Image: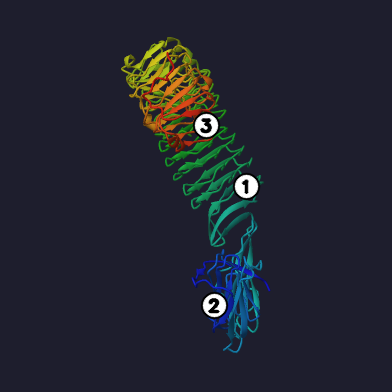
Amino acid sequence: MKKRFFKGTLLVLSLGILTGCSTYQNSDRTILKSANTETGEASLLTVRLEDSTLEVGEKTQVIVNVNFKTNGEFIYESSDTSIARVSETGEITALKAGEVVIKVIDRNDLTRSNSTSLKVVDDIDQKFKVTFLNYDDSLLYETVVEAGKEAEFKGKEPVRANSHSTIYKFNGWDKDISAINGDTIVRATYAESDFGDYFFEGVNGFYKLVGYSGTDEVLTIPTSFNGGIVNGIGERVLEGNTHVKKVIVPNGIEYIDNYAFAENDYIEEAEISGSVLTFGSHMFYRCDALKKVAFHEGVVEIPTHCFNQATAIEEVAMPSTLKRVGDYAFFMSGLAKIELPASVTSIGTTAFSSCPNLTEVIINGNIETKETDTSWFSSCPLLTKVEFKGTVESFEMACFLGCTSLTEISIPDSVVTLGARCFSDCENLATIWLGENTSNFQEDCFQGTPALENGGIKLKETDKKHNIVNGILYSDEGKTVSYIMDATKVPEALNFASMGSGVTKIGDYAFYENENVKSIDLTGVTSVGVSAFDSCENIVQDLVIPSSVTSIGASSFAYLGITSLKLETTLDGIIPKECFRNCRSLVSARIPSGITRLGYGAFGWCNNNFVECYLPLTVTYLEEYAFQMDNKLVVKYEGTEEDWKKITIENGNAGKFTVEYSIPQTNTSETPAE
């Protein structure tokens, strides 16, 4: 007997504590009671049927109730499968007249079982089972039919997946089912149709072209086939085809899969209709002969990697509906000139990077940027002209890195941020006209650029927001220190309240690695940017960060020569990542009440000189490496030991420092003498 398992919802009955073993029967169920000798608790498994009498062809369900712990898996058995068959879910099908016992066994304890009886009657003279199978013998439908009657198929219409060379259409059954006179098995049959030179895939009347083996030089993608609609193009449709030189994607095609025409060395031209709504990536990837492509009105995107390494591409017609150029769209392509229409608002990362022939770029639209839109035109060695006619807020990281033929550029007034290494290694870029709102200069944005060394970073005559004093570039009408034009002219002592128009903001990397600065007075400053004083090792005085400062960036005071630190500001509760990292002369630090979190590596790697840090009761979280390698540090904690145990301490901090409890912030007796 084949055993079947069923896992489902159980009804747990509370029938009291029983001992011993007893059974009783009624008309449709038998109840077995047995004591559990290990727990002393009674176990109960009952079995009943929704219907205890069936006619041939009818079905019913086994109902199982238990009052013991179980995962709900049972074995169902029929004493005579020719009379009634029970499925793995407990469904019973009556097959012929007679009586049968249905047994249920707890799969996890085979000693627990129960059974009930079923009667099958045949009020009609005779019935036969008809089984409908697909071409691969998979079950489609089963039914019971009266002798001499026609079998009716009530399942879904059978289908067979098409191959690349053949389409299959359901063509009826392999046997006559109009008058059934015995148990019958019938199979679905299919009519076959040869595709010719075209290869399609699809069902339910919708197809996509997946291959073409013809010899036409111009391939127009068909939009109908076999009475259905062709609305898509599959991957590598021209793989191995050496004849097609032009592809036309007509109206009606709605999607193109990844790598649709990729790595074909014979296509020279393509036209893409505006009906295409979804593009896959790498559409013309490594199509070495491709020279000309036209995207018609309605197309909104040049997809990711579309022309990646299409080294012969010369011309791409772009519609006024185009909105986005995807990531790596023209990476390493042969494009010589690009003009984006005013409709384009997004350019993906590395979109035009490493184009060896690109000389001119004109962008007419208002471009929206995000930090991941990096390296737009990096490593384009022949690029000499760049013109933005619309707005753009930032040139992100490595935007023009390594554009060695670029000699002059005018940054649009809308640009606020120049990303890290934005113009690095532009070895002939002698003149850079700053936009009047350009105030955020990221790490090494002019590294290796002669404009920085030769006074070639210039202000436009109309610029009223910038000025340069003592080698320092001020933005926002003197309120922001943005960039150091000449590090040797920067004063040793910086009192920002008396600088510019009363400096309130110090930009990212503003004094990064400056050797002149020895002391800073941050009175009146509200914001200190990322790495603003990073690696200014000659700043050795005691550092006070006043209450006016509400924001400091990551690594803003890393690698200083300071010996003591006093925070008078709560900084929205967080000391940011690596803020005071590697201040190896630091001895003492005071953290005010209101600080709740020390960021990753905030005081990490200050090493053995760092011996005391006053922490307030408000601190609830130490991120990883907050005190890394501060092996002689004593944390003087304002709270009790029980309070300390409530602080979340990430991996990398435990055991690297010691803690003294209940040390008030006002206690200065243990502060090292100056």
Q: Quadrant of residue 475?
A: top left
Q: In this view, does 135 lie above or below 122?
A: above
Query: Residue 607 appears at what percent x and percent y?
Result: 53, 22
Q: Quadrant of residue 44?
A: bottom right
Quadrant of the image containing the C terminus: top left
Q: Quadrant of residue 673?
A: top left
Q: Are marks 1 and 3 in contact (CB under 8 Å)?
A: no
According to the image, label 3 marks what residue? 653
Pick the front one: 190 or 563: 563
* Label placed on residue 81: none
Report how far apart the C-alphas of labels 3 and 2 lie in the structure.
Answer: 63 Å
Residue at image coords 48%, 23%: 443
Q: Disc 1 residue type?
A: Leu
Query: Residue 12 appears at what percent x and percent y?
Result: 50, 69
Q: Which of marks 1 and 2 is in front?
A: 2
Q: Residue furthest right?
A: 1
Report how far apart the C-alphas of labels 1 and 2 lie in the structure.
Answer: 63 Å
- Left or right of 525 in this view: 302: right
* Label placed on residue 48: 2
According to the image, label 1 marks what residue? 238
